[in-house]
Structures are given as C-alpha cells and as structure tokens.
Image (cartoon, helix red, strand yellow):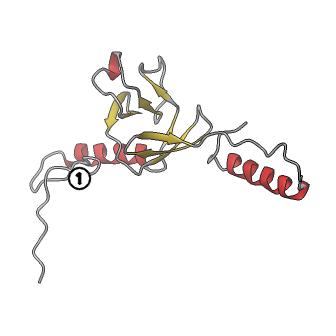
Amino acid sequence: MTEPISFTNASPRFALPFLSPGQAQKEFTVNQAHAVLDSLVHLVIQGTSNTPPASPQEGECWLVGSSPSGAWANQAETIAAYQAGVWLFIAPVVGMQTYDVSAGQSARLTDSGWVYAANVASPAGGTNIDSEARTAIDALISALSDAGVLPTT
C-alpha cells in the first residue's frame, strides 16, 4: 500500500489554498482557489501595464509590468486578475500561454520572458517567381494570424 500524501498549505505551482482538517469556513479557501483557477484556465490578458485600469471589469486579467504602481505596487511581472472587486496576483510559471487582446495574438512564457511571434512578411522579389508557392505562403501567414499565433497585419 502506498503512503498517504502529506499536503502543505497550498499547491506548488499556483499556490492554490488547500483545505485543512477541521478547518472552519472552508468556503473562503475553496472560493479563493476557484477565483485563481477561473483566471488561469484559458488565460486571456488585456495587455501589459504598470498601472491598473481605472474601471476594471470582473474577470479581467493583465500582465503587470516591471515598474508597477498604485494597487499593483510590489507585484512586478505577475498576472493581475480582477475578481470580486479586488486584484488577485498570480505568479506565472514558465510554459504558460495566454492570448493578449491588445496584441491580438498568443504569447508563451519562457525563461527569458513572454514571447510573441514576430511579423512574417509575404515573399517578394527574386529572379524565379512561383506564384502558386507565394499564394500558399500568404495563406499560411493569414491562417496563423487568424489563429492568434502571428500578429495581425
């Protein structure tokens, strides 16, 4: 028989709070975990900013910049999620992906920061022009832009 798992107070990746045996008011702990999960599952951010928006909408998420101020002070490089009228701050982990509404494309967190795909130009010039190949390449660029992988042009 395997040994029972001994849990800490929170999950290792996103610090989701765990319930404790005999804990009073368990709903607060569970609701906090649900709020964090609601923000992270299929993460969509409005953009990156150092200052919180004046009138955030419930469920809105932002990437906090490197020099935050106001309600985001001391929360550099976190995800700010507006839930129940307050900001929740979540430390992102390498490998996370998000859709950035302001950029109109997806981004992925690497060891060196959030990575967005660069613009890809349609083929131009050359001495031997293959119009069918150029049409196919343009269609691929368009499909990747529509899917949010490449920025919209």
* Image point (22%, 48%), residue name: 17
Quadrant of the image occupied by residue 99: top right
Quadrant of the image occupied by residue 151: top right
- In this view of the protein, which residue sits in the foreground, 13 or 153? 153
Quadrant of the image occupied by residue 111: top left
* Image point (68%, 51%), residue name: 144
- In this view of the protein, which residue sits in the foreground, 83 or 116? 116
| Element type where label 1 sits in the image | loop
Residue 153 picture location, percent across and down:
73, 36
- In this view of the protein, which residue sits in the foreground, 129 or 91? 129
**Residue lying farthest to the front in this orientation:** 127
Residue 150 picture location, percent across and down:
64, 44
The quarter in which the N terminus is drawn is: bottom left
**Residue lying farthest to the bottom in this orientation:** 1
Mark count: 1
* 137 left or right, relative to 89: right
Q: Residues within 10 Å of mark 1 (few under 14, many from 20)?
A: few
Residue marked by disc 1? 11
* 89 left or right, relative to 3: right
* Image point (78%, 44%), residue name: 122
Q: Give, as a three-letter code, the residue at label 1.
A: Ser
* Image point (59%, 31%), residue name: 102
Residue 50 picture location, percent across and down:
41, 21
